[in-house]
Amino acid sequence: MSVIEKVKTGIPGFDELLYGGIPKRNIVLLSGGPGTGKTIFSQQYLFYGLQNNEPGVLVALEEHPVQIRRNMASFGWDVRKYEESGQFAIVDAFTGGIGEAAKRERYVVTSVDDVGELVDVVKAAIRDVKAERAVIDSVSTLYMTKPAMARSILMQLKRVLSGLGATSIFVSQVSVTERGFGGPGVEHAADGIVRLDLDEVNGELVRSLIVWKMRGTKHDMKRRPFEITDKGIVVYPDKVIRIGREYYQG
């Protein structure tokens, strides 16, 4: 039996939940409500790769690339030097190329409604930087703009990313009360699902995550607490959170 290659996320405590990391070429759906830390998690994953000579691509569907660079820098993740050296690229699928700052972006999807263009620009960026890691933030945007086609778009993106050797995170926004992972069919396109939550426990908000599925590796089945620090996310793999029964086990 061949040993499955794993990709370390570099998020303290998280790789232990996957017995070493995400199986190579997997597509992981990172799902959660607003403010749960999905974007930070995915950017931390990309930056860890850059520090370890694993090029990456971030497909920005919900935020201006300038804002993304600024937010990443606030955690100490300065991507500009990696962009200059050709190891990192942001695909701007947010501005449509409108505005002065957007004109300076190298990879721009001028019409997000044009699925072919989106896939082509992503493919070009992945090839150019020889990306080993990719993030799409967020696939929920595709559901809002093109619900009928969202599944086929995701399958196309999955084929491109996995086919070119990237291990990817698809960020998926769900409403606070929603139990699913965002959009019909999106679960089936994913090899793994990680759910981030923010819940009230004994009168305070507690962050937790759980690995729902992960092809190619065994994984932890418990709900684990995590924190967002000034250096990013830290997961506590030896602690358990129980939601709903007003019980917190430290």
Image: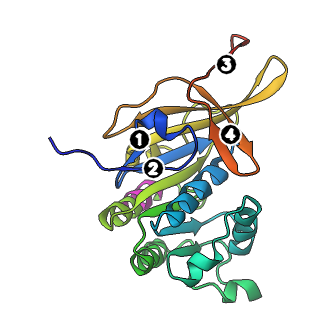
Q: CA distance from mark 3 to mark 4?
A: 17 Å
Residue farthest to the right? 203
Write down the residue under mark 3. 243
Residue type (three-letter) at the residue carrying disc 3 = Ile
Looking at the picture, tell me which residue is in the foreground, 115 or 32. Answer: 32
* Mark 1 and mark 4: Cα distance apart in space: 30 Å
Q: Residues within 10 Å of mark 2 (few under 14, many from 20)?
A: some
SS for tag 3?
A: loop
Q: If you read the primary sequence from the N terminus, does the residue marked by circle 1 or circle 2 appear first?
A: 2
| Mark 4 residue crowding within 10 angstroms, few (<14) / some (14–19) / many (20+) | few
Counting residues from the N terminus, which is met first, the one under dot 3 or under dot 4?
4
Image quarter of the C terminus? top right
Assign a secondary structure to mark 1.
loop
The kind of residue tagged 4 is: Ser
Q: Which mark is residue 175?
A: 4
Percent across and percent down for residue 114 are 50, 75
What is the C-alpha distance between the residues marked 2 and 4?
29 Å
Query: Please, what secondary structure does the residue beneath circle 2 have?
Result: loop
Q: Are marks 1 and 2 in contact (CB under 8 Å)?
A: yes
Residue under pointer 1: 20
Residue 78 percent across, percent down from the top left: 67, 69
Question: What's the residue at 55%, 58% (across, down)?
Answer: 48
Q: Is residue 65 left or right of residue 120?
A: right
Q: Amino acid at mark 2?
A: Lys
Q: Which residues are magenta?
A: 150-155
Dot label at residue 8: 2
Q: Nearer the viewer, mark 3 or mark 4?
A: 3
